[in-house]
Image (cartoon, helix red, strand yellow):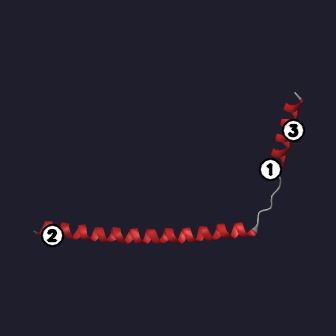
């Protein structure tokens, strides 16, 4: 029974030690900000490319419809 209590005591101490106050470094925060900015820029580029492709497709379809209506 003493071994069981000792096991629980050790597990409790490890759990308590792992929950200690840890300082957040500024480096980690800066890296996150950079990643967010790069992601936003990439997203804007993808949106612009998709918009250009859709506009091109709309123009092609419009021209085909005009040909069908006229011809």
Callout 2 crowding tier (Cα within 10 Å): few <14, some 14–19, many ≥20? few
Name, please, the residue furthest toward the front: 3
Q: Is residue 60 left or right of residue 40?
A: left
Mark in front: 3 vs 2: 3
- Tell me the tag on residue 67: 2
Q: In this view, does 30 lie to the left or right of 46?
A: right
- Tell me the tag on residue 9: 3
In the rendered image, the vertical position of residue 59 relative to residue 20, given as above or below: below
Q: Which residue is drawn at 59% across and 71% down?
A: 37
Mark found first going from the N terminus, 3 or 2: 3
Percent from the top left, x then y, of residue 18?
Answer: 80, 50
Mark found first going from the N terminus, 1 or 2: 1
Report how many numbered discs are placed on residues in the image: 3
Secondary-structure class at tag 2: helix
- For this rendering, which residue is in front, 22 or 36? 22
Percent from the top left, x then y, of residue 1?
Answer: 87, 27
- Tell me the tag on residue 18: 1
Q: Residue at x 77, y 63 (%)?
A: 24
Q: Is residue 41 left or right of residue 8?
A: left
Q: Are marks 3 and 2 in contact (CB under 8 Å)?
A: no
Q: Which residue is drawn at 33% across and 70% down?
A: 55
- For this rendering, which residue is in front, 7 or 37? 7
């Amino acid at each position: 029974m003493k071994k069981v209590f000792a096991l629980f005591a050790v597990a409790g101490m490890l759990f308590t030690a792992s929950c200690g106050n840890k300082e957040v470094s500024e480096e980690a925060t800066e890296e996150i900000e950079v990643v967010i900015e790069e992601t936003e820029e990439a997203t804007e580029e993808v949106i612009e490319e998709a918009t250009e492709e859709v506009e091109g497709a709309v123009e092609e379809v419009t021209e085909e419809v005009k040909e069908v209506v006229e011809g």
